[in-house]
Image (tube, rainbow, N blue to C red):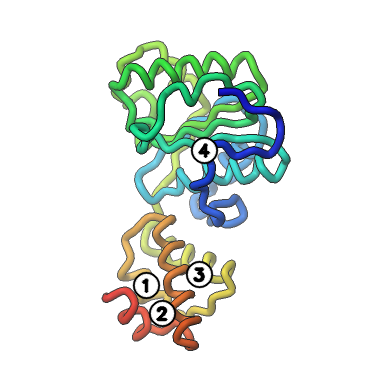
Amino acid sequence: MKFENGPQLPLNLNLDNETRFQNFFEFNDETELIEELKGQSSFVYLWGSTGSGRSHLLQAVCHDSYNKQESSMFLSLAKAESYSPEILSGIEGISVVCLDDIQAITKNLTWEEAIFRLYNDVQQTNCRLIISSDRPPQNLSITLADLQSRLCGFPVFKLHSPDEKQRFEILKYRAKLRGVQLDNDVLNYISNNIRRSLHEIIDLLNVLDEASKIEKRKITIPLIKKVMGW
């Protein structure tokens, strides 16, 4: 598959419009990682548990690429059964390829070989390759030793999942970005009842904001209980 230069988004129709760098709340000093993702490094590997923001940042890279009039590819390998590994062939014209959840295709030799070929292609082009996982590269159960070796040579960054206090700060931050007014008692109630990923926090704010508009009233604890069933 070949792509011409330009702001195309192949396979990026499922990008969340809010998964952008400016919407990412840095609570563990991810400045170095953000700079690396925005920069020109050919390879980056980031890992962290569910809810750490891995998918958000990979999608942010693709949004950033689009804003620069460059093409990109975001592929969730957790859904690899929906695609052919050949989708990674011929990256001419693509500025960045982001592969999310590489642990999902380990021990699938066809996919592993396709990613290894992609790695070699990146070295011959101006493309960048950014990969995420729920574990460090040395802990991946990869069959293809050469691929494992290459991944271990990437600049590696770890993301941490937010604790209770950080979830509270993320809620405040994301609500402010949306122009949603949340009192401290409401923020505390949500924070105490939610144990979800950053993506699900965003979804929750979307749901509550919509319910507030429909019912023409502020987001309150009674409204949250009614909408969420908490």
Q: Quadrant of residue 124?
A: top right
Residue marked by disc 3: 172
The amino acid at mark 3 is Lys
What residue does disc 2 label? 186
How far across and how far down the image is residue 6, in percent?
Answer: 71, 35
Q: Which quarter shows the C terminus? A: bottom left
Circle nearer the N terminus (3, 1): 3
Compared to residue 222, the image places residue 25 above or below, namely above
Asked which secondary structure carries label 1, the reply is: helix
Name the mark nearer the viewer: 3 or 4. Answer: 4
Q: Which residue is mark 4?
A: 11
* Nearer to the camera, 129 or 85: 85
Left or right of residue 16, residue 63 in this image: right
Q: Which residue is mark 1?
A: 190
Observer-nearest of 26 and 43: 43
Q: Is residue 197 above or below residue 55?
A: below
Q: Position of residue 227 (x, y in %)?
A: 34, 77
Q: Residue at x 34, y 58 (%)?
A: 196
